[in-house]
Image (cartoon, rainbow, N blue to C red):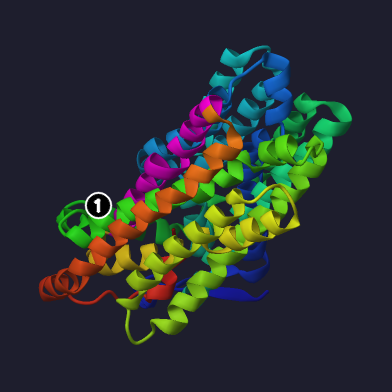
Amino acid sequence: MAFHPIAADDDHCAVGVARKYAWIVFALTFGLLISDYMSRQVLNAVFPMLKGEWALSDGQLGLLSGIVALMVGLLTFPLSLMADRFGRVKSLALMALLWSLATLGCALAQDYQQMFIARFMVGVGEAAYGSVGIAVVISVFPKHMRATLASAFMAGGMFGSVLGMALGGALAAKLGWRWSFAGMALFGLLLAVLYPIIVKEARIAPQRAVRAANKATAAVKRPLSTLFSSHSVVATYIGSGLQLFVGGTVIVWMPSYLNRYYDMVTDKAGGVAAIIVLCSGAGMILCGMLSDRLCRHSPERKVALAIAYCLGSCLLLSAAFALPAGPLQLALICLGMLIAAGTTGPAGAMVANLTHYSVHGTAFATLTLANNMLGLAPGPFITGKVSDLIGLHAAFQLVPLISIAAAAVFFYAKCHYHKDIARLRGQSEPDSVSEAALEVKL
């Protein structure tokens, strides 16, 4: 049987995992990530039905979406630490079971309050899956494959979003909105049961688990001051979160926008919105590749590119929502979303460059917290409240302006970047992990 040589940071302690088994672990973990985002984003496809049946305001609908991102932001770090302590495989299975049962609770909800509680629990279940799941995937493959696997794994979030909106819209149109949630829940429950049966902690290199625990114990003894010690890194957290306010809001509200202003039925609106989400996912990858290519010998250019992505998305989306409904508007929305999430890669690289290598895990958790608390959680809710006052089309005209604030914050980071990098290099040795591998961990 063929084995992968699984290299830790200290390669002389390498262990092996059968290649076939490693890919099975990847497939099941990837499948659960898809289920995660299907359960999270299916709500967007049925917004029009919920609004009509329960007479909800846009603010209430936005809160149903934002509460999931809020819980992910608040609980990612503590739940990830608990998973490292009590076992990642067991923790992932419990997470999937919780969010799947909570999604089933959405299908059974009889009023807004019950739906809100169910969505709250979806957020609790999904809070740490991304960080723990990628840790499991990376642990069963060779070190030289980490960047490829991490980027492929995180792309599952976009695939899940697309499937959640497209399939959710189709199920809602044929069977009713409750079956949209039920379908996502059943898929997740099936994988949650299979996962711990097939994926075993003992087969995912127990020697590495002991080593990782020892390293984690040592890491907490090191100072965490670099997380917030420079103007640049704090500005990067804020700028990244503000820019995701735009992309996250458009993704959540686009099915409703298509329903109201294009007279699209639920399934068609979900399908078109899914295409726009795919544009965002493709843009995230392409912008990251462009950043690496253009900034290979000048990492500070990543800050300038982040500013360009912010201003470019603002220009395109503002132009799109200034137009009446039609093919040209949809084309500009797709182009705007292509670069709206482009700051993800540069922001990840900046955080990695501006923090000590021993606390990179905590640094990325901090970045994730900022992304959710400043962008993904408040964006849908605030837009919904504004929509209640002036309409969704007018609210969408205001949303891209947040990118100007994000660009201004990134510009502030650029003003301090060289000095902060020089100071950090004077305090520690350069990180041995490649910048590309660090960027895809976000």
Residue that label 1 marks: 217
Check the image and report above or below for 219 versus 308. Answer: above
Q: Along the horizontal axis of the image, is 217 left or right of 259?
A: left
Instruction: Return the x and y of residue 334 as percentages of the image width and height.
Output: 64, 59
- Could one spot residue 155 in this view of the protein? no
Residue at screen point 38% across, 49% down: 241
Q: Along the horizontal axis of the image, is 321 left or right of 305?
A: right
Instruction: Return the x and y of residue 37 as percentages of the image width and height.
Output: 62, 44
Residue at screen point 43% across, 74% down: 436
Instruction: Return the x and y of residue 119 as percentages of the image width and height.
Output: 56, 27
Question: What's the residue type where badge 1 is placed?
Answer: Thr
Q: Quadrant of the N terminus?
A: bottom right
Instruction: Return the x and y of residue 225 as percentages of the image width and height.
Output: 15, 55
Magenta stretch, main secondary structure, is helix
**Residue 431 is inside the magenta segment:** no
Quick one: label 1, few (<14), some, or many (20+) residues within 10 Å? few
Dividing the picture into quadrants, the one containing residue 283 is bottom right
Range of the magenta residues? 360-389
199 or 341: nearer the eye?
A: 341
288 or 152: nearer the eye?
A: 288
- Could one spot residue 201 in this view of the protein? yes
**Mark 1: which secondary structure?**
helix
Check the image and report above or below for 237 versus 255. Answer: below
Q: Along the horizontal axis of the image, is 296 left or right of 222?
A: right
Residue at screen point 75% across, 50% down: 272
347 or 155: nearer the eye?
A: 347
420 or 79: nearer the eye?
A: 420
Q: Residue furthest bottom?
A: 297
Q: Along the horizontal axis of the image, is 197 left or right of 123?
A: right
